[in-house]
Amino acid sequence: MQESIIMAPVGGASQFDQAALQRRRALQGSSGPAALVKNARVFGIACFACLGGLLYGYNQGVFSGVLTMTSFGNHMGEWTKDQTKKGWLTAILELGAWVGCLYSGFLAEILSRKYAILINTAIFIIGVVVQCTAVTGVGASAILGGRFVTGMGVGSLSMIVPMYNAEVAPPEVRGALVGLQQLAITTGIMISFWIDYGTNYIGGTGEGQHDSAWLVPLALQLVPAVFLGVGMIFMPFSPRWLEHHGREAEARKTLASLRGLSQNHELIELEYLEIRAQSLFEKRSTAERFPNLADGSPWTMIKLQFVAIGSLFKTMPMFRRVVLATVTMFFQQWTGINAILYYAPQIFKGLGLSGNTTSLLATGVVGIAMWLATFPAVAYVDKLGRRPILISGAIGMATCHIIIAIIVAKNQSSWETHSAAGWAAVAMVWLFVVFFGYSWGPCAWIVIAEIWPISQRPYGIALGASSNWMSNFIVGQVTPDMLTGMTYGTYLFFGILTFLGAGFIFFAFPETKGLSLEEMDVLFGSIGFAAADHERMREINREVGLRAVVRSGSVGEHRAESLDEKSGVRYKEDSF
């Protein structure tokens, strides 16, 4: 399962950041979930975030049930009987998503987040329509081509939609959006499993099954996609993107419209200056590190993404971060989570459940279990720390795999007389997704986002996401052959890898809870990198007037003497 990438709060904030946050809250009056319903525009943004997550989650789960339907198999021929070919039918989407992940960054920067979402929604819709043409006799070719194109849209949207929502939403609700987006993804997975279960009855579950049994679940993907595309037409551009591309007046006007306030309101002034400061920081960081790639042209932006990622491999402290991000994402996928999500009905049949209907029912419970495990996922990650959550989740998942392997090894040839053992193995699968849902699902994305200095975070996250999608593709491709050829060895294999993942976190991944970016540098041996970023940001905040706006409110308790550079008059300033 690929969790969507959202700018969750990461790394300890500076004293100035905390003061700015307090000032915003004093002006806003509420934060978190309460702020979502205070303003209709904000609430609409939250719902929009949920729509994008729902689309992604539904697409992740729907194909597992379709693969097992009799009528679908009649159209696919040997493609559902040959395990390697079945793997391609499933995994081709992840290969497309990997491609979509690669182009999403510069597409969103060149064309805007809004137009990038519209383009990728259209790509997604085209892919779904092509899949549906499989009923006309085209068969596997339509599914393979359609799912690859759909994957391109999914992979890109999974990066751009959260980015857009994070940029148009007030800072006070971004944390709530993290939880809502994650909940929407697991809701989409759960809905897709139960729709598969229901449509499996259309025309009966045997040879007389109607083609609608699998066409309806596939075609229903169009509903949230169309809503997303149509809704996006009426959504504004990201104020951050407008500011970054020199459209300052439009950025301020759009921001005021989103907040339902006048352009001269103090809250608009504060938030606009924060956006302006961040834009200047990114431009100057790029100009300093890559002076030949700072002209802002489309071709330069494309080259910049790859050059910037390549630069992460040139120093040992940054390379260590690369290893941690990519290997963490490798282990997230090789827990076997997507082996479960993509092939759950087949897995449950292999555990002795008789009939496709019963297997689909058990698959529906997987969706419910993961959905329920999502609720506490974000709440305690900053209280307990990343390492305890990741290690405990990995040990729990690995233990479930080992127990399943033992049960299958002892009973795989006698499920008829050992049905209780089969249900015990099924229960372990359900428990497995609970362990994943509260730990490696959300937490892996948080840790790979927070280990990077600000100026390199977008490229570091993109590298981790690329590792995730490629591992996702490989897992989807090899799982059918593993289930057939290795039987209980499949679970033993995933269990051992998941134990190794726990060991990797224990021995190689430091605790990052509550650390400032400067402390991260000390931790990874690149002392001064974040400090330079911090000093650059400090000067920009002063230059654009953001520090003066924050000072104008009664925030912060620590005071120090300071010289007003414009007037030459000394006055009290917060010590941030």
Image: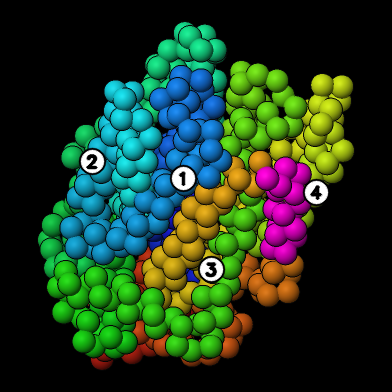
Q: Tell me where residue 102 appears, x and y as whole percent.
A: 34, 62
Rendered position, 562 above or below 169: below
Which quarter of the figure has residue 343?
A: top right
Element under disc 4: helix
Closest to the camera, between mark 1 and mark 3, is: 1
Residue ID for mark 3: 326
Marks 4 and 1 sit apart, C-alpha to C-alpha, by 27 Å
Mark 4, residues whose alpha carbon is within 10 Å: few (<14), some, or many (≥20)? many
User: In the rendering, at what x and y percent does residue 462 appear?
Assistant: 41, 65
Kind of residue sitting beneath label 4: Ile
Q: Circle 2 sits on which residue? A: 122
- Segment tinted magenta in the rendering: 485-502
Q: Tell me, for residue 402, which label it has, or none.
A: 4
Q: Of callouts 4 and 2, which one flags the residue occurring earlier in the amino acid sequence?
A: 2
Name the side, left or right, on which 399 lies relative to 296.
right
**Cβ atoms under marks 1 and 2 closer than 8 Å:** no
